[in-house]
Image (tube, rainbow, N blue to C red):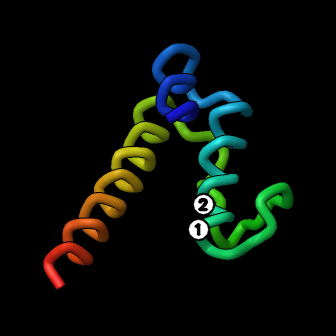
Amino acid sequence: MFAEAENELSGATTAAYDAINMVRRRGYGKTISTPDATVDIPSGLSKADFFKYLVRKELLNWVEKVSVNMI
C-alpha cells in the first residue's frame, strides 16, 4: 500500500520502487533487501506505468484468493 500512496503523491520514487520490489522479492522467495532483476519491476517508469504494475499485482493477488476459495 505504501508504494501505491507514494506513487499517487510523488510519482515513481525510489521509496515506491523499494517498497513494491521488497514485496515482490518476498513473494518469489528472494532476499528482500537485495535487488534482483529477475523479479524487480523495471526502473524509470512513468507514474502511469508504475501504477499499471501496481494494479496488475493487486489483480493477480485477488484472482489467486478467489481461485483458492473456489477449491
Q: Which residue lies most toward the right here?
A: 34
Q: Give the numbered dot on residue 27.
A: 1
Residue at 66 percent across and 28 percent down: it is 13
Q: Which corner quadrant of the image does residue 15 belong to? A: top right
Query: Which residue is the extreme one toward the left?
Result: 70
Give 32 or 16, whichever is nearer the viewer. 32
Left or right: 4 as drawn, with respect to 55? right
Q: Is residue 65 above or below residue 15?
A: below
Which percent across, then down, holds residue 25? 67, 64
Taking 52 as reference, is 35 left or right?
A: right
Regarding mark 1 in the picture, which secondary structure is present there? helix
Question: Cα distance, mark 2 to mark 1?
Answer: 5 Å
Residue that badge 2 annotates: 24
Dot 2, crowdedness within 10 Å: few (<14), some or many (≥20)? Answer: some
In the image, 36 versus 28, the foreground residue is 28
Q: Amino acid at mark 2?
A: Arg
Q: What kind of residue is marked 1?
A: Gly
| Mark 2 residue element | helix
Tell me: 29 left or right of 59.
right
Identify the disc placed on residue 37. Answer: none
Q: Badge 1 local density, few (<14 within 10 Å), some, or many (20+)? A: few
Q: Position of residue 3 (x, y in %)?
A: 56, 34
Q: Which quadrant is home to the C terminus?
A: bottom left
Q: Are marks 2 and 1 in contact (CB under 8 Å)?
A: yes
Q: Residue at x 77, y 59 (%)?
A: 32
Residue drawn at (66%, 64%), measured in percent from left and top?
26
